[in-house]
Image (cartoon, rainbow, N blue to C red):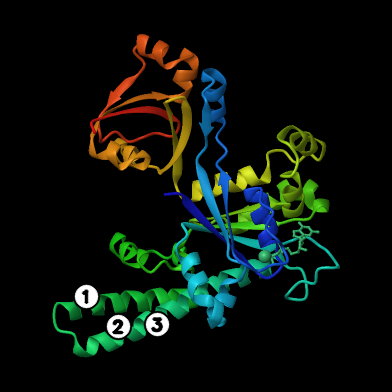
Amino acid sequence: MSVDIGITGLVKSGKTTIFNALTRGKADIESSAPNIGIANVPEPRLKMLADMLHPKRVVPAEVRYIDIGASAKGLVEDKDISGQLLSQLSNVDALISVVRAFTDESIPHVEGSLDVERDIATTDLELAFSDLALLERRLERIKVSLKGAKQPERQGLLREQEMLINIKADLEKDVPIRQQKLTTDEARTIANYQFLTAKPLLIVVNIGEEQLSQAVSLETELNSHYSRPKCRITTICGKLEAELTQLDDEAAAGFRADFGMGESGLDRAIKLSYELLGLISFLTIASGEVKAWSIQSDTNALKAAGKIHSDMERGFIRAEVISHDDLVKCGSLSEARKKGLLRLEGKNYIVQDGDVITFLFNV
Ligand SMILES: Nc1nc2c(ncn2[C@@H]2O[C@H](COP(=O)(O)OP(=O)(O)O)[C@@H](O)[C@H]2O)c(=O)[nH]1
Ligand SMILES: [Mg+2]
């Protein structure tokens, strides 16, 4: 199961441009068709292992990006396109909302003027708009069901009704669900609805080339306003980053250095979405392949094995674990084994970021 991230935002904010940059894609920016693409999760530890072990294949973890090609509000209002696209958007693990900050006279802004803060608020409102529509439909249905309901079903429906009314009231006060205080039980119930404002959100401010030198200070300022639970903000120069993906890595790195761009905005965006989702990586070395895998932090060894193959979970015996740093110090797994640095862990072991794991299992 890959991690899916949906891209939303106002018309011509640069959604498809950023999608192309993130996925090294060549999707047509003139078309509003949805685009789906894959990006590799940057993982320097994977490269260090590869340099040390010279495996046949190096396989990074992946994130899937979905550029819906419409704003959340557009989806709710336009019934012709809404159903399928909205459900695609509802199924993602996190959202990126693209907000325009670049200036370009030849590309009129949908709202008539450039205003990053207003657009962030508008995008939030659009996501809330979609959730409110869903809440109303569900509340309507509960009302109907209540007419014929007997205990204990009635009890459950009433509880859900009360919860949804509270969520709706907060949402109407502009508090997205991701910021609302819910009990574990409530959070579990609403997870089924896939509300858009409940999803972790990365706001990507799409800056122009001429703003690159201010990117860091802009980001610091934005962060002080917008760092909230399950919400982060970053800047990307979409157009330039999309162009850079067409160069080879070395040329792109040279270009970045010349422009003082530092770390790739794309790498940062992927890392931030990872952080938002509470994901960590573990690594495996097997059959000539070095691979990185994404899991939720606090995952035990049994579930981590299941991420690779359900047989591994079913037949789990134990895991041989070493931290990436220790392995690099030893130079090879066999050397680490000699030094007694490979730990044997059982199924309840909580996998740590950067663990290199060999699973032993029965088939
Ligand atoms: N100058 C400039 N133009 C951009 C930038 N990002 C996107 N654009 C242009 O803005 C227009 C809309 O971008 P697009 O990605 O299609 O937006 P979408 O409607 O949100 O998918 C296109 O003509 C892009 O080339 C940028 O950072 N700088
Ligand atoms: Mg587009």
x, y percentage for residue 182?
35, 64
Callout 3: CB less than 8 Å from ligand 1 = no
- What residue sits right under mark 2 in the picture? 142
Which circle's residue, 2 or 3, is located before the other in the chain?
Answer: 3
Residue type at mark 3 is Arg
The mark closer to the camera, 3 or 1, is 3
The quarter of the rendered structure image containing the C terminus is top left
Using a 10 Å C-alpha cutoff, classify the residue at mark 1 as few (fewer than 14 neighbours), some (14 to 19) or many (20 or more): few
- What residue sits right under mark 3 in the picture? 137
Callout 2: CB less than 8 Å from ligand 1 = no
Query: As drawn, is 119 to the left or to the right of 335?
Result: right
Query: As drawn, is 48 to the left or to the right of 190?
Result: right
**How far apart are the two marked residues, 3 and 1, measured between alpha carbons?**
18 Å
Looking at the rendering, which quadrant does residue 337 occupy?
top left
Marks 3 and 1 in Cβ contact (< 8 Å): no
Which circle's residue, 1 or 2, is located before the other in the chain?
Answer: 2
x, y percentage for residue 226?
59, 58
Please, is residue 180 above or below residue 319 in the view?
below
Identify the residue shown where x is 41% and y is 49%: 1
Element type at marker 3?
Answer: helix
- What residue sits right under mark 1 in the picture? 156
Identify the residue shown where x is 34% and y is 39%: 304
Query: As drawn, is 184 to the left or to the right of 244?
Result: left
Q: Quadrant of ligand 2?
A: bottom right
Using a 10 Å C-alpha cutoff, classify the residue at mark 3 as few (fewer than 14 neighbours), some (14 to 19) or many (20 or more): few
Looking at the rendering, which quadrant does residue 118 occupy?
bottom right
Identify the residue shown where x is 73% and y is 48%: 241
**How far apart are the two marked residues, 2 and 3, measured between alpha carbons?**
9 Å
> Does the rendering let one see residue 174?
no
x, y percentage for residue 269?
60, 48
Q: Which mark is residue 84?
A: none
Q: Nearer the viewer, residue 23 or 95?
A: 23
